[in-house]
Image: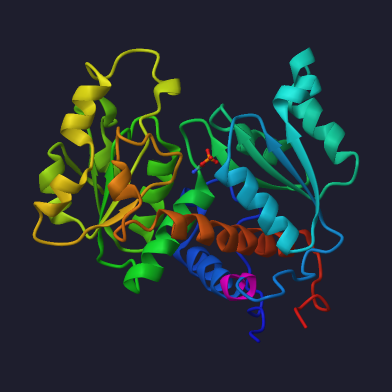
């Protein structure tokens, strides 16, 4: 039975973005996640590590994977949980974000996990409240636990991230996953190329240390890993390309294009997938795809983040190691 790692400290009080993390922080999160991954694959998967810590999951925007993954991570750590969704709350009556959160915190909540459509909402909260804040996706800005779990999944599959060639393909412009991936992968020493229609590639993205390529086949021939992003139609209030059919013809990944390469590329996708648009079903469900490994790793990464941040609220887990 493994012991939990000797708790090392993160350099941050909150997880607002991967951009704020040092390389050492990422390595601490990964080594902590290694232990939790082993633990959650045991017959008894629950540890008392966050007993007496209360965490509120505040989802002001839709989510399946992230919401369920955080909730499961919290339950595996024995935290008490409050689940809040904006659609059935007094936000509908005009209550502000800060009032809503302050009211929840008055009920003695130590940590907040927040997804919000406004970039910067978690940063705003972190400046105004005493609880630890974890960003579960803020608009088009960052999705730090997704960036971490994606890099962790590459490390698991290829042994390390350093010097690996990773392509991020699709709607880069609207993607918080792309930005968190870029920050994480570059800090870990990967080479990163973004590929998509010119209208969906932000200007000056090369200032983040990535290359830009518009040809899908060339990109796939170059990379070890292709992280394929969803076309975010809900964030596109103008037309960025003529039609979905044309997008799929130029940037959709299918069996035919993969079979035309002289190598096997690992396929990733953060979900939810638009099947038949950015990724064909036979590719998404193939042995080349590690999409469900990403989902599994998400629980271990989120357990690690919550565990390490709980250490920043002076919570002692000295007697809370798994027995
Ligand atoms: N990857 C991701 O954030 O998925 P959800 O929107 O379902 O949480």
Left-right relation of 257 to 80: left
Report the residue at 27% width, 23% height from top.
Answer: 244
Left-right relation of 248 to 94: left
Report the residue at 72% width, 56% height from top.
Answer: 74
Residue 220 point in image, percent of width and height? 17, 50
- The C terminus: image quadrant: bottom right
Report the residue at 58% width, 45% height from top.
Answer: 66
Q: How is the image coloured?
A: rainbow
Left-right relation of 37 to 230: right
Left-right relation of 173 to 260: right
Residue 231 point in image, percent of width and height? 35, 30
- The N terminus: image quadrant: bottom right
State which region is magenta.
36-40
Residue 206 point in image, percent of width and height? 24, 41
Report the residue at 37% width, 35% height from top.
Answer: 230
Spot the residue most to the bottom: 1
Q: Is residue 284 magenta?
A: no
Residue 11 visible? The answer is no
Q: How many marks?
A: 0
What is the chief secondary structure element of the magenta stretch?
Answer: helix
Residue 38 point in image, percent of width and height? 58, 76
């Amino acid at each position: 039975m493994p012991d939990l790692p000797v708790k090392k400290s993160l350099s941050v009080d909150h997880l607002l973005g991967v951009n704020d993390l040092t390389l050492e922080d990422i390595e601490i999160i990964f080594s902590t996640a290694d232990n939790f991954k082993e633990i959650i694959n045991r017959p008894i998967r629950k540890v008392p590590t966050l007993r007496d810590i209360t965490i509120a999951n505040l989802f002001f925007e839709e989510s399946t994977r992230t919401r369920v993954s955080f909730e499961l991570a919290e339950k595996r750590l024995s935290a008490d949980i409050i689940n809040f969704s904006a659609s059935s709350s007094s936000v509908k009556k005009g209550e502000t974000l800060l009032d809503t959160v302050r009211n929840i915190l008055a009920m003695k909540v130590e940590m907040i996990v927040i997804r919000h459509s406004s970039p910067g909402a978690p940063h705003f909260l972190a400046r105004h409240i005493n609880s630890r804040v974890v960003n579960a996706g803020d608009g088009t800005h960052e999705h730090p636990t997704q960036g971490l779990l994606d890099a962790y999944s590459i490390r698991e599959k290829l042994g390390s991230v350093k010097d690996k060639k990773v392509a991020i393909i699709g709607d880069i412009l609207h993607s918080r996953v792309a930005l968190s991936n870029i920050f994480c992968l570059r800090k870990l020493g990967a080479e990163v190329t973004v590929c998509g229609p010119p209208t969906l590639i932000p200007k000056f993205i090369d200032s983040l240390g990535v290359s830009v390529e518009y040809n899908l086949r060339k990109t796939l021939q170059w990379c070890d890993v292709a992280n394929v992003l969803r076309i975010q139609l809900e964030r596109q209030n103008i037309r960025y390309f003529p039609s979905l059919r044309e997008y799929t013809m130029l940037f959709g990944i299918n069996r035919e294009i993969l079979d035309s390469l002289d190598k096997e590329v690992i396929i990733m996708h953060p979900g939810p997938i638009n099947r038949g648009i950015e990724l064909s079903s036979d590719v998404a469900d193939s042995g080349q795809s590690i999409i469900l490994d990403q989902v599994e790793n998400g629980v271990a990464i989120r357990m690690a983040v919550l565990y390490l941040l709980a250490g920043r609220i002076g919570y002692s887990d000295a007697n809370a190691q798994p027995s």
